[in-house]
Amino acid sequence: MSGAVVLGVGVDLVHVPSFEQQLELAGSRFAGVFTPGERRDVADRAAGHGGGSGRHLAVRWAAKEALVKAWSASLFGEPPVMGDEALRQVEVVCDAWGRPRLRLLGAVATHLPDVETHLSLAHDADHALAYVLLTH
């Protein structure tokens, strides 16, 4: 990251039990936000660690929200970014060792062509946290 310019920082904290309740509501906005790859990864993690998928989806939701916040911060004084559509075009992927990264898709990738994303995720008790740093 030597010589990189920080464009924006975003942080999001999710209360996992509340998020899980929202997931169960008919017509929840969360239903269409996660990519097929994210859903597969979450199912694998839930099966491997026991318990449900709620905490794994919650931390991915936090990552998407943190990316939008970082992107919005980079546009200070300009119109806001794309809303919910942007959330569907941000995917949390993990390498073979479980280290997370953001994959930008569609219009989000087009709007952020030369931007490097840095992602950190955490879980503690009933909370999930994501931190995103955008650099150029």
Image (cartoon, grey):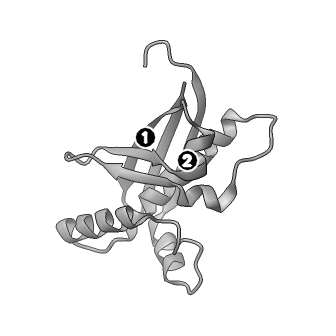
The amino acid beneath tag 1 is: Leu
Q: Secondary structure at mark 2?
A: helix
Give percent across and percent down for residue 102. 43, 45
Which of 44/17 is in front?
Answer: 44
Give percent across and percent down for residue 37. 35, 62
Q: Are marks 2 and 1 in contact (CB under 8 Å)?
A: yes
Q: Is residue 72 left or right of residue 60?
A: right
Q: Which quadrant, please, contains the C terminus?
A: top right
Residue at 49 percent across and 59 percent down: it is 61
User: Marks 2 and 1, how far apart in space?
Assistant: 9 Å
Question: Within 10 angstroms of label 1, few (less than 14), some, or many (20 or more) residues?
Answer: some
Residue at 58 percent across and 78 percent down: it is 28
The amino acid beneath tag 2 is: Ala
Q: Is residue 116 left or right of residue 40?
A: right
Which of 15/22 is in front?
Answer: 22
Which of 114/25 is in front?
Answer: 114
Could you tell me if residue 55 is visible in this image? no
Q: What residue would you read off at disc 2?
A: 66
Q: Which quadrant, please, contains the N terminus?
A: top left
Could you tell me if residue 25 is visible in this image? yes
Mark before the other along the chain sequence, 2 or 1: 2
Q: What residue would you read off at disc 1?
A: 119
| Residue 58: quadrant of the picture | bottom left
Residue at 44 percent across and 47 percent down: it is 103
Q: Is residue 73 left or right of residue 91?
A: right
